[in-house]
Amino acid sequence: MNQQPQNSPKRSRTTARVAAVQALFQCEQGGENAETVIKQFTRHRLDGENNDAFEEGQIPYADLRLFSEVVRGVTLAQDAIDAELTSTLPDTWPLERLDPVLRALLRAGAFELGNDVAPGIVINEYLDIAHGFFFGDEPRMVNGILDALARKKTSAT
């Protein structure tokens, strides 16, 4: 990931996006609702105290507003987001076949593409996050899928 000071606004948004991917993964795998997971993350991982390093599960300097917005937004619009992703994936790769972390990452990126954030920023952020989780072709897949979704959204407006 880019080397920004840990408490910079850009870094806090990047950290919030990483935490959102982890929270969405937890929602799916644990069957927990978004509000429960947001509270758990806020209380135990994003508390802001002594969070100057990724130690003992702590996630430093996250933008809590963005984190909550992404987690809530994805869970509320998940059916529509999944339909968008499914229409972009090859027929041989249904959404359910993807790694759960990859699904969470794509859902978060797809959600943010629908907001007032420049598509290039969203794609680059989630591409960087993908490189943190995956070492194979998954980052290229993230780039291609989010780029295709961004083009669809741009042509629709």
Image (cartoon, helix red, strand yellow):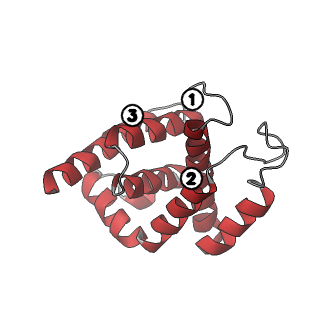
Alpha-carbon distance for marks 1 and 3? Answer: 15 Å
Near mark 2 (Cα within 10 A), the count class, few <14, some 14-19 or many ≥20, is many
Q: Which residue is mark 1?
A: 1
Q: Which residue is mark 2?
A: 21
Whichever of labels 2 and 3 marks the residue nearer the N terminus, that label is 2
Q: Are marks 2 and 1 in contact (CB under 8 Å)?
A: no
Near mark 3 (Cα within 10 A), the count class, few <14, some 14-19 or many ≥20, is few
Q: Quadrant of the N terminus?
A: top right
Q: Quadrant of the C terminus?
A: bottom left
- Disc 2 marks a residue whose amino acid type is Val
Q: Is residue 45 above or below residue 34?
A: above
**Residue at figure coordinates x 33%, y 43% from the top left:** 119
Alpha-carbon distance for marks 2 and 1? Answer: 15 Å
Whole-percent x, y for residue 62 in the image: 65, 48
Alpha-carbon distance for marks 2 and 3? Answer: 18 Å
Whichever of labels 1 and 3 marks the residue nearer the N terminus, that label is 1
Whole-percent x, y for residue 149 in the image: 27, 50
Q: Secondary structure at mark 3?
A: helix
Q: Is residue 135 above or below residue 145?
A: above
Residue 31 appears in view = no
Q: Are marks 1 and 3 in contact (CB under 8 Å)?
A: no
Q: Which residue is mark 3?
A: 140
